[in-house]
Image (tube, rainbow, N blue to C red):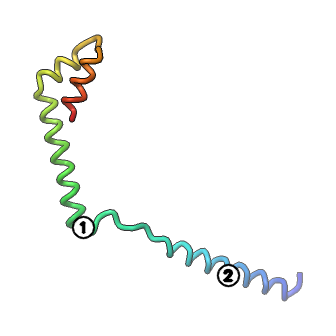
Amino acid sequence: MNKKDFLKTYKAINKMNLSDAQSDSSPQEPKLYRSEQDEKLIKEMHFAKFQKNLHRTQHSEEFKKLVEKEEWDEQDMQKLLASLR
């Protein structure tokens, strides 16, 4: 290869690197939350719902009976789903 071919190759590589860098920065993912405060509030709300559901299932006699049961039928499945809602 001669000097011109080397220069053309380097220019082509530089163009590809520049276009890759521009294409990487262009498609930015949209923010999931509007602000850090919104993110904190939403996460706290979901955690509170989780804690409430956990407390409800741990203290539910009906749920305890279902979990300890050996054989389940359709009604048991419906009761379980209703208690988890």
Which residue shows up at 16% across the image and 42% down it? 51
Residue depth check, mark 2 versus mark 1: number of the one nearer the observer: 1
Which residue shows up at 13% across the image and 33% down it? 56
Amino acid identity at mark 1: Glu
**What residue sits right under mark 2 in the picture?**
14
Front one among 36 and 1: 36
Q: Is residue 84 above or below residue 2?
A: above
Estimate the x, y position of residue 27 in percent, counting from the top left: 49, 71
* Label 2, label 1: how far apart the Cα atoms are: 39 Å
Sequence-wise, the earlier of marks 2 and 1 is: 2
Estimate the x, y position of residue 63 in percent, counting from the top left: 17, 23
* Quadrant where the image shows the C terminus: top left
- Residue 36: which numbered mark, if any? 1
Front one among 35 and 77: 77
Front one among 61 and 16: 61
Q: Is residue 26 above or below residue 48?
A: below
* Quadrant where the image shows the N terminus: bottom right
Please, what secondary structure does the residue beneath circle 2 have? helix
Would residue 20 appear left or right of 11 to someone viewing this image? left
Amino acid identity at mark 2: Asn
Local crowd size for mark 2, using a 10 Å CA cut-off: few (<14), some (14–19), many (≥20) = few
Estimate the x, y position of residue 53 in percent, counting from the top left: 17, 38
Please, what secondary structure does the residue beneath circle 1 have? helix
Which residue shows up at 71% across the image and 78% down it? 13
Task: Give the quadrant of residue 6.
Answer: bottom right
